[in-house]
Image (cartoon, rainbow, N blue to C red):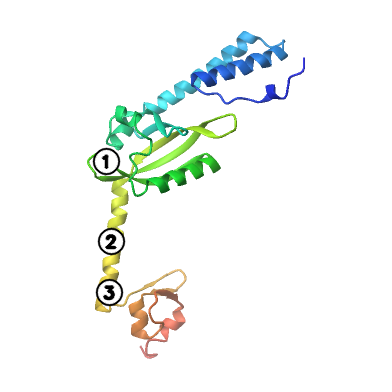
Amino acid sequence: RRMSKASTTFPRVSADRPARNRWLGWLDNLLRALPTVSLAAARDAAELALADKDAALAALFETDSAGVVEVDLRGNRFIRVNRRACEMMRRSAEDLLRTPANSGVHPEDRAAVLAECQAAIKATGQWDAEVRHIGPDGREFWLRAGVSTWARDRKKRPTRCIAVLQDVSDSVRAKETLRDREALMRLGQQIGRIGTFERDLRTGKLFVNAETNATFGLQQHADRMIEPEKWDRVFVRED
């Protein structure tokens, strides 16, 4: 008996009941076309594969080292959240499961983050970014989200994803503090007309700031890399 073209389309195995039924229905159709294969054995193998996938997902959600959430992309809702994810997002599991998945993202970033995430998932099935959130108390915090699609519909459109979360608030604040201090130092140099330069010991090239350029007449109003020969010319030859 010949198999139709439709019967050779492999459905994606999923842990949800409708997908399970589609998978087993497809398997039944296939086995009717291959009478030499044991129907019971093949069905048992399919059920075992689904059970293994369920066990792997369950183990992932039980970890305490990272926040883990499963998201319904079509409805923008959390399906599952682990305890660590609730702690990171400063909200209870009940609260997270009844609100939009991106409701915790800072309002100023929410639209841009959603658009960026959707575009990346559509193109590659994955997305990774540091996202600013806001807690129920109004305080800002940052989470790094690593998102991977694991379920698609019959038209290959992403329907569900798993996101692994890490709290990077301290790291982000440290970077912001460093930027602020560097900006303050540059401002002090401008006000005090303090010139600085850096030398790359491997190449011998130098980077001079705008104040140094102005002092030695190298090039006004610019921070730039200069050749050692040009730098040497600003000094008296005897020195």
| 80 displayed left or right of 187 | right
- Which element carries disc 1, helix, strand or loop? loop
Question: Looking at numbered disc 3 in the image, what kind of residue is underneath it?
Answer: Gln
Badge nearest the viewer, 2 or 1: 1
Q: Residue at x 28, y 61 (%)?
A: 180
Q: Residues within 10 Å of mark 3 (few under 14, many from 20)?
A: some
Q: Residues within 10 Å of mark 1 (few under 14, many from 20)?
A: some
Q: CA distance from mark 2 to mark 3?
A: 14 Å
Q: Position of residue 232 (x, y in %)?
A: 41, 83
Mark 3 = which residue? Answer: 189
Q: What is the quadrant of residue 97 in the picture?
A: top left
Mark 2 = which residue? Answer: 180
Q: Residue at x 77, y 18 (%)?
A: 2
Q: Position of residue 212 (x, y in %)?
A: 34, 79
Numbered circle sitting on residue 135 = 1
The earlier-in-sequence mark between 2 and 1 is 1
Q: Nearer the viewer, residue 224 or 28?
A: 28
Give the tally of numbered discs.
3
Badge nearest the viewer, 3 or 1: 1
Q: Is residue 11 above or below residue 192?
A: above
The earlier-in-sequence mark between 3 and 1 is 1
Q: Are marks 3 and 1 in contact (CB under 8 Å)?
A: no
Q: Position of residue 152 (x, y in %)?
A: 54, 31
Q: Is residue 40 above or below residue 87?
A: above
Question: Looking at numbered disc 2 in the image, what kind of residue is underneath it?
Answer: Asp
Question: Looking at numbered disc 1 in the image, what kind of residue is underneath it?
Answer: Gly
Q: Position of residue 119 (x, y in %)?
A: 50, 44
